[in-house]
Amino acid sequence: MSTDPETRRAIAKRVVDRAATRGMLIDTDPAFLTLLEEWIRGDIDTKAMRDRYLDLIALRAAELRDARTSRIGINRSEASNQTNEE
């Protein structure tokens, strides 16, 4: 789709507004907003924007899983040390 930035910005605003009326605040994610600005400028197409955002979400989920695993590991070690000290 070859559209000018003003038209793309209007499209983006409609999408964000529609999501907000449904309770989805997608315009609060800085990474999404960065991708959105790239799309508005015409630097990337919609598919690239979607693919990059899905990659970012997957990376964040993996980081959360790793953080939880680390915390669980630390808690278990501390608990076992306390048991051994008694």
Image: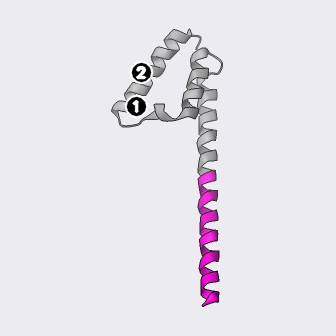
- Disc 1 secondary structure class: helix
Residue at point 59% right, 61% down?
Answer: 68
Q: What residue type is labelled 2?
A: Arg
Query: Which residue range is magenta in the image?
Result: 63-86
**Residue 14 disc label:** 2
Q: Is residue 85 magenta?
A: yes
- Disc 2 secondary structure class: helix
Residue at point 51% right, 10% down?
Answer: 6
In the displayed structure, would residue 38 be above or below residue 32? above
In the displayed structure, would residue 8 be above or below residue 74? above
Q: Does the magenta stretch include residue 34?
A: no
With 22 as the anchor, is 50 left or right in this view?
Answer: right
Residue at point 59% right, 50% down?
Answer: 61
The residue singled out by tag 1 in the image is: 19
Residue at point 58% right, 31% down?
Answer: 50
Q: In which quarter of the image is residue 86?
A: bottom right
With 38 as the anchor, is 21 left or right in this view?
Answer: left
In the displayed structure, would residue 38 be above or below residue 2? below
Q: How many marks?
A: 2
Magenta stretch, overall SS: helix
- Residue 83 place in picture, x, y as percent: 60, 86
- Residue 69 place in picture, x, y as percent: 62, 64
Identify the image quadrant of the N terminus: top right
- Residue 48 place in picture, x, y as percent: 64, 28
In the displayed structure, would residue 84 be above or below residue 22? below
Q: Residues within 10 Å of mark 2 (few under 14, many from 20)?
A: few
Q: What residue type is labelled 1?
A: Ala
Q: Report, in whole angstroms, how far the alpha carbon at label 2 lies from the one at label 1.
A: 9 Å
Residue at the front extreme?
Answer: 85
- Residue 63 place in picture, x, y as percent: 63, 52
